[in-house]
Image: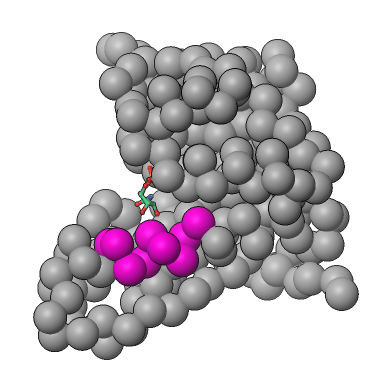
Amino acid sequence: MKIGILISGRGSNMTAIIEAVRDQRIPDAEVSVVISDKKNALGLEKASERGIETIVVARKNRTREEHDAEIVNELEKRGVELVCLAGYMRLLSKDFVRAFPEKIINIHPSLLPSFPGLDAQRQAIDYGVRISGCTVHFVDEHLDHGAIILQKSVEVTNEDTSATLSAKILEHEHTLYVEALRKIVGGKCQIIGRRVVFEN
Ligand code: GAR
């Protein structure tokens, strides 16, 4: 299965996916391209170092629809079948979501539906929750809303700051994303309503 990864920044989840594909922890997959909307995204160099084609599709002064149409075109040209958002900090247009039905996955640093949107770890600290975590989910037309594939919880202590909580969650993000992709690429999952069902 050909995977395209979208990033905006550091790319640590992207790197985890690339390395899991390379080591066959996600079998029968190939990372065909990494696309960033930011030309200075640190992840671009990490992808190139690992031999993956990278493209920058800058937002310029275009509408979301125009920007997304170019990304979809680049993905389709390469035969990408599964799109992984890995710290891609832009909401996708309806047309993008419809171009890859049930084939776009995202990771979010909270236990959805709590704390969608930006700065999820800061939101969790400010709210005073005792447990937070990360969620791998399918992307639909609403922000951080699609069917949940996997979640992992972490404890939040009184000593935690947004930075320490982010670091704790990130450790789990990498393994959770790889685990979700193993199941999805292996064809072992079905979406029934809002529920994602795995076969044994
Ligand atoms: C990760 O914590 C990811 O969950 C989060 O951005 C970070 C990207 O790190 N994504 C979102 O907040 C999306 N709403 P990375 O670039 O090192 O993978």
**In-front residue for pair 33/95:** 33
Residue 30 location, quadrant = top right
Q: Where is residue 176 in the image (x, y as percent from the top left)?
A: 56, 63
Front-most of residues 175 and 189 = 175
Determine whether 42 is above or below 172 in the image: above
Query: Where is residue 80, by image quadrant?
Result: top right
Location of residue 99 with respect to 133 vertically, above or below: above
Q: Where is residue 190 in the image (x, y as percent from the top left)?
A: 79, 63
- Tell me the residue at 26%/82% (across/down): 156
The N terminus lies in quadrant: top right
Tell me what residue is drawn at x 79 percent, y 71 percent.
198
Quarter of the picture containing the C terminus is bottom right
Image coords of residue 164 (percent x, y): 21, 67
Look at the image and name its color scheme: one colour
Tell me which segment is drawn in magenta: 166-174
Q: Tell me if residue 78 can be seen.
A: yes
Q: Image height check: is 29 above or below 129?
A: above
Identify the residue at horizontal 50%, vertical 40% (top origin).
14
Looking at the image, is 58 positioned above or below residue 154?
A: above
Q: Main secondary structure of the magenta part?
A: helix
Q: Is residue 103 visible?
A: no
The verdict on residue 70 being magenta is no
User: At 25% from the left edge and 69% from the top edge, which residue is drawn?
Assistant: 165
Based on the picture, tell me whether residue 167 belongs to the magenta stretch.
Answer: yes
Q: Is residue 71 left or right of residue 41?
A: right
Q: Quadrant of residue 128?
A: bottom left
Q: Position of residue 73 (x, y in %)?
A: 62, 16
The answer to whether 91 appears left or right of 100 in the picture is left
